[in-house]
Image (spheres, grey):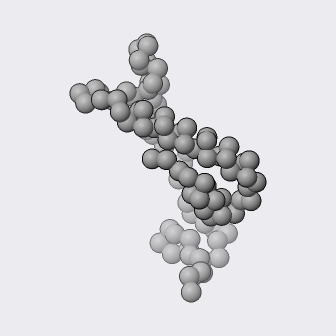
């Protein structure tokens, strides 16, 4: 995939950016360079390779420091909802904002 100057102008317009001609040319070069890197990565055959949990695993063994999934603070829902103007079944009620 390769972008052209019209694509850069359209992207700049959508992003509400005002780019000078030299900035557009530089942006075109940088974005197309990025797409070249992506194409090179897509060209690599990765069939049969197991995904890594961490990129460092390519050079050394990594022991992930995982903690137990346990609540560390008591449930204070009722105390936190006392100051709310409207609560129903443990949920904050808010005004409808979609017209």
The picture places residue 97, in percent across and down from the top left corner, at: 59, 80
Q: Position of residue 52 (x, y in %)?
A: 37, 27
Describe residue 66's horizontal placement relative to residue 7 as left or right.
left
Foreground pick, 66 / 72: 66
Percent coordinates x, y for residue 8 in the rendering: 61, 55
Q: Is residue 30 left or right of residue 17?
A: left
Please state which of residues 14 and 21 is positioned toward the viewer in this rendering: 21
Q: Where in the figure is residue 43, as x and y percent of width and height?
A: 35, 33
Q: Quadrant of residue 50?
A: top left
The structure residue drawn at horizontal position 57% and vertical position 63%, both measured from the top left corner, is 78
The residue at the point 30 percent across, 29 percent down is 45
Between 64 and 36, the one lying in front of the other is 36
Task: Examine the rendered structure and indicate whether residue 77 appears above or below residue 85.
Answer: above
In this view of the protein, can residue 11 be seen by the observer?
Answer: no
Query: Is 11 rendered above or below residue 44?
Result: below
Residue 17 in view in this figure: yes
- As drawn, the residue found furthest toward the bottom would be 99
Q: Quadrant of residue 44?
A: top left
**Residue sitting nearer the eye, 85 or 26:** 26
Residue furthest to the top in view is 60
Horizontal arrangement in the rendering, residue 87 relative to residue 48 (left or right): right
Q: Looking at the picture, does residue 64 appear above or below residue 9?
A: above
Residue at left offset 61%, top offset 46%: 28
Residue found at x 41% / y 17%: 58
Q: How many marks?
A: 0
Q: In the rendered view of the protein, which quadrant contains the C terminus? A: bottom right
């Amino acid at each position: 995939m390769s972008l052209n100057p019209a694509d850069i102008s359209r992207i700049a317009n959508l992003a509400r950016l005002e780019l000078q001609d030299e900035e557009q040319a530089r942006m075109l070069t940088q974005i197309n360079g990025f797409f070249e890197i992506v194409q090179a990565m897509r060209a690599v055959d990765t069939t049969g390779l197991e995904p890594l949990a961490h990129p460092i695993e390519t050079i050394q063994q990594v022991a992930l420091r995982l903690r137990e999934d346990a609540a560390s603070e008591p449930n204070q829902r009722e105390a936190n909802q006392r100051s709310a103007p409207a609560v129903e079944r443990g949920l904050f009620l808010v005004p409808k904002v979609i017209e």
